[in-house]
Amino acid sequence: MNDELQHLKNLGKTSAQWLHAAGIHNASDLRRLGAVDAYRAVKARGFRASKALLYAIEGALLDVNWNQLPPAHKAELNGQLEAMAAHNKS
């Protein structure tokens, strides 16, 4: 199977399967949603994804290894995630 998501940096078989299950099938879908919404979609499907997946998706979008994302960038992603979670609780 030629899976476009698996050809992106940081994304392997499991993360691609989780993204597919969340309705994200290619790089265009991923770009349209962005890392935070894609991560939230995976979590909403019940997968036990860690924050590493959030960083991996962002790295895939930026074509960099996820562990090379600056701490400030990771903090910004976490802030967006927390803001969305707080917004959904209200």
Image (tube, grey):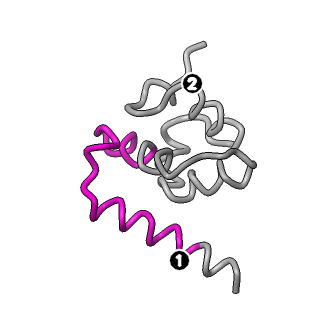
Is there CB contact under 8 Å for labels 1 and 2? Answer: no
Kindly indicate the quadrant of the structure image that contains residue 33.
Answer: bottom right
What amino acid type should be assigned to the residue bearing mark 2? Lys
Left or right of 48 in this view: 76 = left
Side of 13 where 43 appears, left or right: right
Q: Which residues are magenta?
A: 57-84
The residue at the point 55 percent across, 48 percent down is: 50
Question: Of residues 51 and 60, which is closer to you in this image?
Answer: 51
Please state, as top left, top right, bottom left or bottom right, where the C terminus lies in the image: bottom right
Find numbered disc 1 in the image and state the secondary structure of the residue it sits on: helix
**Neighbour tally class for label 2: few under 14, some 14-19, many 20 plus, Cα within 10 Å:** few
Residue 73's tag is none
Q: Position of residue 35 (x, y in %)?
A: 48, 53
Q: Which residue does the image show at 48% across and 54% down from the upper left?
A: 34
Residue that mark 2 sits on = 13
Give percent across and percent down for residue 80: 47, 70
Q: Chief secondary structure of the magenta span?
A: helix
Quote the CA–CA distance across marks 1 and 2.
Answer: 29 Å
Report whether 24 appears left or right of 58: right
Q: Quadrant of the N terminus?
A: top right
Q: Is residue 38 above or below residue 75?
A: above
Give the structural element (helix, strand or loop) at label 2: helix
Q: Is residue 11 above or below residue 35?
A: above
- The image shows residue 16 at horizontal and vertical percentages of 58, 31
Residue annotated with mark 1: 83
Q: Is residue 6 magenta?
A: no
Q: Mark 1: few, some, or many residues within 10 Å (few <14, many ≥20)?
A: few
Query: What kind of residue is marked 1?
Result: Ala
At a point 69% along the width and 42% down the height, the residue shown is 23
Q: Is residue 78 magenta?
A: yes
